[in-house]
Image: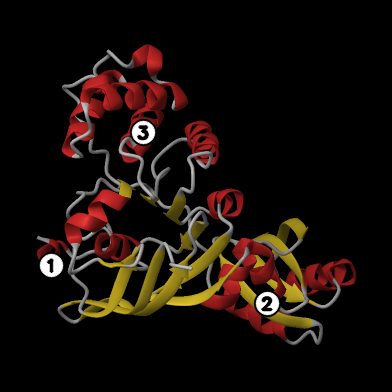
Amino acid sequence: MMKAIEVTDLVKNFGTITALNGVSFSIEEGEVFGLLGPNGAGKTTLIRILTTLMRPTAGKAHVMGINVEKEKAAVRKLIGVVPQAMTSDLDLTGLENMDIYARFYDMPRKEREGRIEYLLGMVGLKERSNDLVATYSGGMRRRLEIAKGLVHKPSILILDEPTIGLDPQSRHVVWELLKNSLDEDGLTILLTTHYMEEAELLCERIAIIDYGKIVAIDTLEGLKRQLPDKDIVEITVGGINATKVIEEVKTLTFVHSIIYAEGTLRISVDNGAQAIPLLVGRIEDTGGRVISVLLKQQTLEDVFIHYTGRPIREEEAKKVSFLIGAGVPQKWGR
């Protein structure tokens, strides 16, 4: 069966900076595929190559069997794109934005009017369709971007950090919208994100990308099965010498690994329930003050930390250009 997207040994260099370093993966038709990684990991660079806006340094990428370098126009007809940056014109209404976008694809008037009405209703903007986009909230504008990406009935919808910068309530509204959009016949979705919850909720398979490389790829449960069978204890502490505490805790025979970030020790142990009092005692012996203790089941975040050695931090949204954007040195993106 033809793959919806197939990427083989993809490399992208910006001078001495390597944004993508031999990336390979494939996506089945109808699949929801997530690319999880922190800002700067190479996600947006990969999206630009798949959407024909950027040429790779080496390697190949195909969309529905079509080479993205050699047949750009054919690829663009097959994909819908929701970039990080908001691209709708603030001085036009939501309806006008949709209509202009549909005209780019030469949709006949009757077809585009019916399609636009359907999509604006689906994203909850039908009652605001004749209002200027300048009056929309951030969540409403993001929902309009998704509707635009679907207007020409693409085979593949590509979303680059679709909820970045949104408040938690708006983010959940967009997630519900994306789940509902899966009813589109045969729609394949490629989603990039640095939100763990977003990847867990929406994606059938997840690839973890870090420093331009795919370090793991599988279903959520498959990724969890790759972890060592250990319990995770998270201890929030105050008044400690982190280096000294880590050295002391590592001497305990049941401790397998320890990471300290933002006042929290994340410790992999054999038996969490039995380990907690011993861990607390050792930390207090070194002069530390234990604020809280949490015994955790393994999550996607644990998988990410296992492969990269660090957690993804919640990062502030950046104002980006659709043509340049986060993660690409601007002098190379023009």
Task: Tally the marks.
Answer: 3
Marks 1 and 2, Cα distance to the nearest angstrom? 38 Å
Which amino acid lies under the numbered mark 2 shown in the image of this protein?
A: Gln
Which amino acid lies under the numbered mark 1 shown in the image of this protein?
A: Trp
Q: Residue furthest right?
A: 274
Tell me if mark 1 has few (under 14), some (14-19) or many (20+) residues whose alpha carbon lies within 10 angstroms of its own.
Answer: few
Among numbered discs 3 and 2, the one appearing first in the sequence: 3
Q: Mark 3 sits on what residue?
A: 147
Residue 4, image quadrant: bottom left
> In this view of the protein, can residue 160 be seen by the observer?
no
Q: Nearer the viewer, mark 3 or mark 2?
A: 3
Q: Mark 2 sits on what residue?
A: 226
Among numbered discs 1 and 2, the one appearing first in the sequence: 2
Query: Mark 2 and mark 3 in contact (Cβ < 8 Å)?
Result: no
Colour logic:
secondary structure
> In this view of the protein, can residue 63 be seen by the observer?
yes
Residue 221, image quadrant: bottom right
Image coordinates of residue 327 in percent, x first then y, are 28, 62
Q: Could you say which is closer to the camera, residue 334 or residue 6?
A: 6
Among numbered discs 1 and 3, the one appearing first in the sequence: 3
